[in-house]
Every structure is written in C-alpha cells, then in structure tokens.
C-alpha cells in the first residue's frame, strides 16, 4: 500500500511539473509533442497521439504522434474509438482493441503494428469546448487500469487548457501574418494605380478606386502613349481578396507590356486572353475595358470584355447612351472571336464613364441597388464639374444610398470628359 501511495504521489508531482512547463509560452507543435511524451511516460504507454478537434469541419486530426508516418491524419469526429470519446466527452478504456467495433484494424496492417489496448481521453477546455482527444496505445505491462484513467483525467485537464491556449495563439499569429501580408499587398496594389491621370489638352480625366477588402479585384490605369493618345483600362477579377488582386495586377502588366510593344487592340486581346486561360483557375475570369483615346480624332476605340454598362453622356442633347459589353470576359475560353463595336465619338462636353459593378450593385437597407439610372442622373446634374469632383459626387451618393449596409464589392470609376473650351 505504501508503494502505491508513493507511486501516486510521484505521478502527481510529475503532473504538477508538466503543468508548470505547459504554462510557459510554447509553439503548438512543440506542445503536442510534449503532451504525448509526458502522457506515455506517466501512464507507461508504447505510443500516443493527440487528435485535435476541427469544429468547423467536425473532424479530428493529428499532426504529431509517436512514429506518425504521415504529415496529417484526418477523419470524421464521430468515427472510430477516438470519435466515440469525442462524441461522449468521456474516457474510453478498451482492453482488447480487436474486439471493439470502432477499431480500424487496417491501420495496424499498414503500420506493421499490433494494438492490444487503447485509452482515449477527451481534452476539454475552460469553456467546456472539445479541444481534442488524447489517445494512448499499449500499456507496457497489461492493460490500462482504473487508476490510469484517474491519472489520465487529471493530466488531460491540464493539457487541454494549455493546448487551447497554444492553439488560440497560433490562430492569432496566423491571422496577424495574414493581416500583414494583405496590408502589404494592398499597399503594392494601390501604388500601381496612377498617382495622377495623364494631361491631354482638351480633355479632363479622373480615376478612383475603393476596395471592399484589404485587397481588391478591381484596378484601373491610364497610360499616356504620347501627348495625344491614352490607354484606358478598367479590370475586375471575379471574387475578392488576394487571389483576384494578384490576377488584375498580372493583367495590368500584360496590357501595359503589349501597348509598349505597339500591339493593336485585337492582338492585345488575343494574347492576354489566351495567357489568362492558362493561368487562371477554371472558375476565375476577368471582366475588362481596354480602350485607346485618340485626342486628335476625338475617338475612343475599345473592347469591353464582359465590362458593362458603359455610359456615354452627350452634352449636346443631355442624353446618355448605355452601351453593352462587346465580348466575353478574359480567361474563359481561348481564341474568342471579336467584333469591333465601333469607336465612341467624343463631342465637346461629352463624358465617357467606366464604372465597375460595385457602384451599380451597392444595395441599401431594403436591398434596392444603387443602379444605372441614379448614376446617369448624377452625371447629368453635375456634368460641368471637374471629373475628380464628379467622381466624388457619385461615391457620396452611393454611400448615402447604402446607409448602414457595408460595401461588399470593389468600386472603381474612370471618367473621360472632352472639355467645352
């Protein structure tokens, strides 16, 4: 009896020592290794594994275990002996693994190992949420006892809290890194937007962009090819976040390079589209307006690939043409046939507006979209303003319309005005 009391006291001291060690800052993977090693040592088990609980997917997964030969094991949280333990949140002591219906004998065959007995202990955090399951295999002598279950329960309660803390810390650090990377990506993306629009005698140009996320799928550009010609670009990649942002940055670079090499609009479209078909995932595409303003002829030649509507305000009549897309979006299929939509002729006082769907589709509290007609009315009412101020008028009206509804899509505006004088 004295020997049993000394043994119990020794175990408790070791658990207290583990608690002290686990209270220090430690990486989650290192802590998992430490938990497994301590549990095996204290309970005299040959092997051990911690299965963490993935609440979102309702799965158990293991990254660290004794002689674990794969990077990760993952399975439904209601499957197998560990799944029973997780579901019931109670210790499961299996003295004969092969006689238990939940035991997967295939694992033993694959690993060349024979499992005799299993002790599965639920790891429950401070808020009574399931952190995971600690599973020990094959006690070095005999099977796991009731005393082992009591020791395991005490050990698991300490380990669960430590693992919960380490896991939250890992998630926080990952989130911080993602936030940092997204901030850096946004800085890079915003630096690619024109600091100022080209100066073309007789014309007033303005461009503006507001991403919905830290990085956006919209981009615009205006490149002066000489003093009388300007490349106009507005592109919108499907989706939000870093992937679409990288896609439009790549697209912008391709368009710029093509024009520097003096490609015509048809050749530019063909090369850029076919390249994007290869580069983009199947569900991804880019809608884009690519046009060339030729100030000497007062014409805008263009292809509107899925980018619509285009608004052409006529100063002489006060009417606005609403133009449709002239081709499919970039990246959907190779060798898309193109039809020339014909140039837009800019008379004095005319305004050509390139506006992404984030403006038109912004809803209010009742779900009503801002729409094309409201945009046209603002252009008509403020056609004499400088284009930068007209851009601000449009955005202010969208914000007022949205009320408390959060912006859920990127917003981009490019305006071209042929001045009256």
Image (tube, helix red, strand yellow):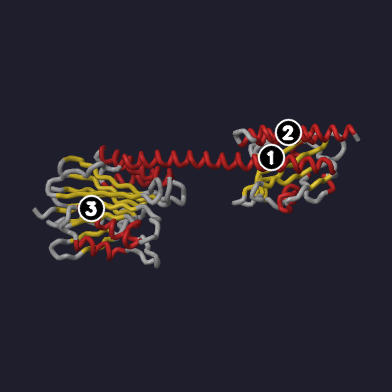
Q: Position of residue 109 (x, y in %)?
A: 77, 40
Q: Which residue bears the numbered disc 1?
A: 159
- Label 2, label 3: how far apart the Cα atoms are: 67 Å
- Label 1, label 2: how far apart the Cα atoms are: 10 Å
Within the image, what quadrant is residue 325 found in? bottom left
Q: Position of residue 394 (x, y in %)?
A: 26, 58
Compare marks 1 and 2 and give the one earlier in the sequence: 2
Compare marks 3 and 1 and give the one earlier in the sequence: 1
**Residue at 87% across / 35% down in the picture?**
4
Compare marks 2 and 3 and give the one earlier in the sequence: 2
**Which label sits on residue 415?**
3
Residue 315 visible in this rendered orientation of the protein: yes
Which of discs 3 and 1 lies nearer the camera? The answer is: 1
Report helix, strand or loop for mark 3.
Answer: strand
Q: Which residue bears the numbered disc 2?
A: 38
**Residue at 71% across / 43% down in the picture?**
157
Q: How many marks?
A: 3
Q: Position of residue 225 (x, y in %)?
A: 20, 40
**Which label sits on residue 380?**
none
Foreground residue, 18 or 307? 18
**On screen, residue 214 above or below 315:** above
Report helix, strand or loop for mark 2.
Answer: helix
Contact between labelled residues 2 and 1, with CB atoms less than 8 Å apart: yes
Residue 327 visible in this rendered orientation of the protein: no
């Amino acid at each position: 009896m004295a020997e049993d009391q000394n043994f119990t006291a020794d175990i408790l001291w070791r658990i207290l020592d583990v608690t002290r060690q686990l209270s220090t800052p430690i990486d989650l993977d290192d802590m998992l290794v430490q938990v497994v090693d301590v549990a095996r040592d204290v309970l005299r088990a040959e092997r051990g594994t911690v299965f963490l609980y993935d609440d979102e997917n309702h799965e158990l997964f293991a990254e660290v275990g004794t002689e674990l030969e794969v990077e990760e094991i993952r399975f439904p949280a209601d499957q197998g002996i560990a799944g029973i333990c997780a579901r019931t949140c109670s210790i499961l002591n299996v003295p004969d693994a092969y006689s238990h219906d939940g035991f997967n004998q295939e694992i033993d065959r694959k690993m060349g190992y024979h499992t005799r007995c299993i002790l599965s202990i639920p790891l429950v955090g401070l808020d009574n949420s399931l952190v995971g399951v600690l599973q020990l295999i094959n006690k070095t002598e005999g099977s796991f006892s009731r005393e082992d279950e009591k020791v395991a329960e005490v050990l698991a309660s300490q380990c669960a809290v430590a693992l919960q803390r380490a896991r939250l810390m890992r998630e926080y650090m990952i989130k911080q890194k993602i936030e940092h990377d997204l901030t850096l990506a946004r800085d890079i993306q915003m630096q690619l937007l024109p600091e100022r629009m080209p100066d073309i005698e007789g014309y007033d140009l303005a461009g503006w962009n507001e991403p919905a996320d830290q990085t956006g799928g919209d981009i615009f550009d205006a490149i002066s090819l000489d003093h009388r010609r300007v490349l106009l670009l507005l592109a919108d990649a499907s989706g939000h976040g870093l992937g679409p942002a990288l896609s439009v940055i790549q697209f912008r670079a391709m368009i710029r390079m093509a024009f520097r090499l003096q490609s015509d609009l048809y050749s530019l479209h063909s090369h850029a589209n076919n390249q994007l078909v290869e580069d983009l995932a199947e569900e991804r595409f880019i809608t884009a307006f690519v046009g060339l303003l030729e100030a000497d002829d007062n014409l805008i030649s263009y292809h509107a690939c899925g980018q619509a509507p285009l608004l052409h305000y006529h100063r002489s009549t006060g009417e606005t043409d609403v133009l449709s897309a002239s081709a499919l979006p970039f990246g959907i299929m190779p060798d898309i046939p193109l039809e020339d939509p014909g140039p837009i002729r800019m008379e004095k006082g005319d305004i050509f507006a390139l506006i992404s769907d984030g403006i038109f589709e912004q809803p209010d509290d009742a779900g009503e979209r801002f729409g094309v007609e409201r945009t046209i009315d603002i252009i008509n009412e403020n056609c004499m303003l400088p284009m930068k101020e007209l851009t601000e008028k449009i955005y202010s009206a969208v914000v007022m319309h949205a009320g408390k509804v959060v912006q859920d899509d990127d917003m981009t505006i490019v305006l071209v005005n042929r001045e009256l004088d």
